[in-house]
């Protein structure tokens, strides 16, 4: 357990919670339908907004082997830049970066378009045969048209469970019984996804590749320069999942590039001003400002030194009396004016 607390704080928290929440959800201990992102339950005035979905959606992986694979990618590249990147040298900088890219991912993948409304009804008997799955149609189309009220119908959320809602039905898996196929059919209306961890992992991988473009990385059995890593992750999602999942994951790359543009490219080459900064309260959360604060780095540990104002002076303890030494001494002032060697 001591080793866990020495790991980078942001990535260790996200990765560990992703394993715990996903394993509990797919194991039937909790219902993932209460934690996935569903915009009508978050951006609403008809009920109390379920704000926690904005955060919990980053803690849910895909099923089966991805319960370990998704958090692995997240930790592998997130911890590397949290420890080693010079742009996240100050306490709280990586947290600010994560919060920014997460916000862009949520906005980019949220289907907030209200142009297409679907009226549907549950097919009797199907729910009992295939509960909470995306492999069979549990809802059939009645009408496509204007917004209509929808009362107490189970809406399947892929493999994440189902929702019983009396709100308006914005998007349901109809055509082929899968949410992915519905997303593909409605690509012109904006992306809609329920979990964001793959996109966040891709954002970390993109920033890692920007920081270390020529570093060799191993991707399963292939070794190549890390500048190709984001595209390898996208290609794997495209092949193993679906094009719509790859499109949703692509928002992580867009978010990371937007952060790079606003904090490095625009201020350096465009003469602009960096408008993304770490608030002082966030720096305090991560232990900034105190003498002796230890920061974990890829090459070792950096210790916050004592400034002039707190080093010596009225009310400050003497370094020798406190049992501390900085490798130099400032005791000449108490010896006297001194004498020239060889003089009288």
Image (spheres, rainbow, N blue to C red):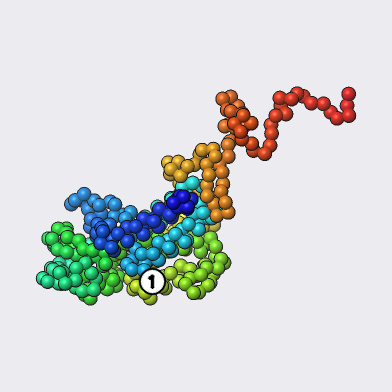
How far across and down, in percent of the image, does residue 152 sit? 13, 60
Q: Mark 1: give few (<14), some (14-19) or many (20+) Cα within 10 Å.
A: some
How far across and down, in percent of the image, does residue 20 sit? 34, 57
Tell me which residue sits at (32%, 67%) in the image.
Answer: 63
Q: Is residue 283 above or below residue 139?
A: above
- Which quadrant is home to the C terminus? top right
Q: Residue furthest left?
A: 124
Is residue 312 among what the camera can see? no
The quarter holding residue 303 reads top right
Instruction: Read off the residue under disc 1.
Output: 237
Q: How many marks?
A: 1
Tell me which residue sits at (58%, 28%) in the image.
Answer: 317
Drawn side of residue 112 relative to residue 15, left or right: left
How far across and down, in percent of the image, does residue 176 sit? 23, 76
Q: Is residue 334 above or below residue 245?
A: above
Tell me which residue sits at (61%, 35%) in the image.
Answer: 324
In the foreground, 169 or 83? 83
The quarter holding residue 150 reads bottom left
Drawn side of residue 230 relative to residue 86, left or right: left
How far across and down, in percent of the image, does residue 194 sit? 29, 62
Q: Residue furthest front?
A: 1
Question: SS class of the residue under badge 1?
Answer: helix
């Amino acid at each position: 357990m001591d080793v866990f607390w020495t790991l980078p704080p942001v990535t260790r928290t996200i990765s560990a919670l992703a394993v715990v929440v996903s394993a509990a959800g797919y194991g039937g201990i909790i219902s993932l339908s209460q934690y996935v992102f569903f915009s009508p339950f978050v951006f609403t005035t008809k009920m109390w907004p379920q704000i926690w979905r904005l955060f919990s959606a980053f803690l849910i992986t895909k099923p089966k082997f991805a319960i370990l694979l998704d958090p692995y990618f997240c930790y592998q590249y997130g911890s590397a830049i949290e420890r080693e990147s010079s742009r996240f040298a100050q306490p709280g900088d990586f947290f600010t970066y994560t919060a920014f890219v997460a916000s862009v991912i949520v906005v980019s993948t949220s289907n907030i378009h209200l142009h297409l409304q679907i009226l549907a009804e549950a097919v009797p008997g199907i729910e009992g045969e295939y509960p909470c799955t995306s492999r069979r149609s549990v809802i059939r189309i009645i009408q496509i048209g204007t917004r209509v009220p929808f009362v107490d119908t189970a809406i399947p959320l892929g493999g994440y469970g189902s929702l019983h809602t009396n709100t308006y039905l914005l998007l349901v898996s109809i055509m082929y019984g899968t949410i992915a196929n519905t997303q593909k059919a409605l690509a012109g209306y904006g992306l809609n996804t329920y979990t964001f961890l793959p996109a966040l992992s891709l954002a970390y991988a993109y920033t890692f590749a920007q920081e270390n473009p020529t570093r060799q990385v191993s991707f399963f059995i292939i070794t190549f320069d890390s500048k190709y890593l984001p595209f390898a992750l996208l290609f794997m999602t495209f092949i193993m999942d679906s094009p719509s999942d790859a499109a949703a994951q692509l928002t992580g790359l867009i978010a990371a590039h937007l952060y790079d543009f606003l904090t490095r490219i625009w201020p350096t080459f465009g003469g602009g001003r960096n408008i993304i900064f770490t608030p002082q309260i966030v720096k305090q959360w991560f232990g900034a400002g105190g003498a002796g604060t230890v920061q974990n780095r890829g090459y070792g540990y950096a210790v916050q030194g004592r400034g002039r104002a707190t080093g010596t002076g009225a009310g400050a303890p003497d370094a020798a009396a406190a049992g501390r030494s900085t490798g130099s001494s400032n005791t000449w002032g108490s010896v006297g004016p001194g004498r020239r060697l060889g003089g009288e």
